[in-house]
Image (spheres, rainbow, N blue to C red):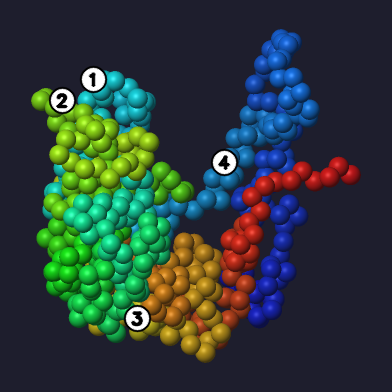
Amino acid sequence: MLNRQGRPTEAGESSEALAGTFTGNRALIIEEPLIFEIGRPEVSGVDLPEAPKVGHRLGALERRRPVGLPGLAEPEAMRHYVRLSQKNFGIDSGMFPLGSCTMKHNPRLNEKMARLPGFADLHPLQPRATVQGALKLMDMLAQALLELTGMEAVALSPKAGAHGELCGMMAIKAALAARGEGHRSTVLVPNSAHGTNPATAALIGFHVASVPARPDGTLDPRDVADHLNADVAAIMLTNPNTCGLFERDVVRIAEAVHEAGALFYADGANFNAIVGKVRPGDLGVDAMHINLHKTFSTPHGGGGPGAGPVVLSKALAPFAPVPFLRRDGERLALVEHTAEAGAAQPFGRMASFHGQMGMFVRALAYILSHGGDGLRQASEDAVLSANYLKAALADVMSVSFPNRPAMHEVLFDDEWLKDSGVTTLDVAKALIDEGFHPMTVYFPLVVRGAMLIEPTESESKASLDLFIATLRDIALSIRAGETARFAGAPYFAPRRRLDETRAARSPVLRWVKPAAE
Ligand SMILES: *Cc1c(COP(=O)(O)O)cnc(C)c1O
């Protein structure tokens, strides 16, 4: 039995209850096999002349079987990739409220600028005299990031937030070694931290000590002080933190950390909430990465390329990695080698070249087109959107820290699902059926069944209202005991609920040609 929305009405009647189609297609959403399953090596989209017979010099290394590349005619290739693209969901197709990720609009102006041939066609080994414009752009971006953060220097080359963390922590390690305190081996990390923080510290040989948050979700400077001693190298702190709360005692924490001879690494992934409102340098930060793909609207890009420039305080600036920009009269140059660094003591290098040029162009286009007032407004609107969701859902879902204002994201736990048989994962899957990318689930780990929602400043009020109405409808369904809506969700996605553990633990990454019949 299907109800009027096409969902099964009773638990247990799952996919079979949905009428299938003869073709497996759903309306004009077309099933698409792998290209290896449909391609034939003898087919090609172009009519090439017969290749001349040439002798080869491969000896016994000559390939014995054809490579087996799938061939498609041009219209087949076109349909294959267009159908795949229609299965993709991105920020351009709908709301993407992933908390901790800042999935905001990527303005088309940025894309247009990044495609200018003068930037897009550069080669990193071009002579310096031919890339003065690109170096100028990097310098302008660097100056803007320094102005927004109130810091002393910036390393542009790291290629993601996590890579930036590594860069900042390596600068901290180098600074400690330079002052004869290389023995400091402990890094303090709050228990709500993103997994990359302890992973970064551990990767370069630090011992990680976890600092618990107080019941209101923020760090107590006294708890930090209890953990500080002559062995502590640094604290890694996210502000606003991963519960979406501003660490209001951050200045006292920074002072205590510095008094103990340690340094303050700030995870800047949540910078979108505070740009133009507060400068991390004024809070006592020594190093912070900036995810250009979160705060400055460059695309997350399906795993890359990202960009994670790191801003550094006066104490750390001399240890910034090569390459860095240096003004040479009228001209700009990249200092590529430690030997040319003069008084500076670069700890090394993070990337073969200078970083992600295309992302620098996009980020600077975003910064210049917004201006200082526009950037501040974006932060304010992001925070307003999150608090609007919080206020509109607080009576039906359980807000984890109801008494603290949310910053750019709002954290719910699964208290509202208690005894319903519905889990956080079920709610996320039901949202897919309703046309929303799920929120971040089960992170941060400090609350049970976390649902972290970050609407960003890019959503209109109408779009926020539809999302709120959808979650309220979900909450009503749960209260009415309509568990079938959740048990098999998503019902309408091209692929149904996956065994995510198996997919992560034993992924099948290779197509194997079926044995000939
Ligand atoms: C996204 C994120 C990171 C890592 O950044 P990547 O660019 O994904 O490597 C680190 N910390 C926090 C809090 C984040 O949200």
**In contact (CB < 8 Å): disc 4 and disc 2:** no
- Badge 3: few (under 14), some or many (20 or more) residues near its Cα, within 10 Å? many
Is residue 2 shown above or below 47? below
Is residue 201 shown above or below 244? above
**In contact (CB < 8 Å): disc 4 and disc 1:** no
- Label 4 to label 2: alpha-carbon separation: 46 Å
Task: Decide if residue 320 is on the left or right side of residue 294.
Answer: left
Quickly name the residue at label 4.
Answer: 82
Using the image, tell me which numbered label, if any, was put on residue 129: 1
x then y, percent, for residue 291: 31, 52
- Label 4 to label 3: alpha-carbon separation: 42 Å
Q: Earlier in the sequence, mark 2 or mark 3?
A: 2
Foreground: disc 4 or disc 3: 3
Quickly name the residue at label 2.
Answer: 331
Amino acid type of the residue that numbered disc 4 sits on in the rendered structure: Val
Label 2 beta carbon within 8 A of ligand 1:
no
Foreground: disc 3 or disc 1: 1
Q: Can see residue 462?
A: no
- Badge 2: few (under 14), some or many (20 or more) residues near its Cα, within 10 Å? few
- Label 4 to label 1: alpha-carbon separation: 42 Å
Residue reaching furthest to the bottom: 419
Amino acid type of the residue that numbered disc 3 sits on in the rendered structure: Ser
The quarter of the image holding the C terminus is top right
Q: Nearer the viewer, residue 259 or 235?
A: 259
**In contact (CB < 8 Å): disc 3 and disc 1:** no
Q: Nearer the viewer, residue 417 or 221?
A: 221
**In contact (CB < 8 Å): disc 2 and disc 1:** yes
Task: Decide if residue 102 is on the left or right side of residue 245.
Answer: right
Quickly name the residue at label 3.
Answer: 400
Which residue shows up at 49% across the image and 76% down it? 424
- Label 3 to label 1: alpha-carbon separation: 56 Å
x then y, percent, for residue 342: 16, 35
